[in-house]
Amino acid sequence: MKLSKKAEYSLRALVVLARMPEDTSIQSQQLAEQTEVSLKFLEQILTMLKRAGILQAKRGVGGGYRLNREARVISVAQVIEAIEGELVQLFDPTEVPNFSGSMALYGGLKDLEREISKTFVELSIEALANNDGEEGMLGYGI
């Protein structure tokens, strides 16, 4: 399992925004530079996050993007769902073969999907933004 570039870049942008002073906006060009994402690709992502209600945008002088609500209430799950449409799917349940042990195997994978999804739901953008390496290690395990 690997996050798509869109999901990763979304999280990058939100971490930068979460670390900014409250009620501060940043223009997409500056955000692209800080996150090391191409402006064109980032603008597509920002539009998706705005549509999902995660970001708000203001045009004109002093405009730009900022979080639409506190980073502590925005979960990684909400971001991934806004970008990808679903959290985690390790296998297609309609294509489960019937062999000896298949119920155990695919039941275990389904349990793993649930645990990963639960972790994404519990993990906030604030927690990611405040994770500064070893000292701030997140306490999430799967």
Image (cartoon, rainbow, N blue to C red):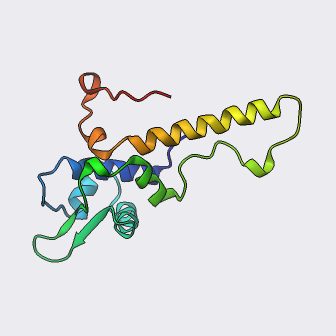
Residue 55 appears at what percent x and percent y?
29, 63
Q: Nearer the viewer, residue 2 or 87?
A: 87
Looking at the image, the residue that sits furthest to the top is 134
State the residue lying farthest toward the right.
99
In the rendered image, the residue lying farthest to the bottom is 60
| Residue 20 image position (x, y, % from top left) | 15, 51
**Front in this rendered view, residue 8 or 95:** 95
In the picture provided, is 47 more to the left or to the right than 108? Answer: left
- Residue 1 visible in the shown view: no
Quadrant in the picture for residue 132: top left
Quadrant housing residue 91 = top right
Location of residue 25 in the rendering, given as x and y in whole percent from the top left corner: 16, 62
Instruction: Where is residue 116? Give x, y as percent.
Output: 52, 38
Residue at 26 percent of width and 50 percent of height:
71
Q: Is residue 116 above or below residue 51?
A: above
Residue depicted at 24% across the width and 62% down the height = 29
Residue plotted at (85% across, 41% down): 97
Residue ID at (83%, 28%): 101
Q: Nearer the viewer, residue 85 or 3?
A: 85
Q: Is residue 66 above or below residue 80?
A: below
Visible in this render: residue 61? yes
Q: Is residue 11 left or right of residue 135?
A: right
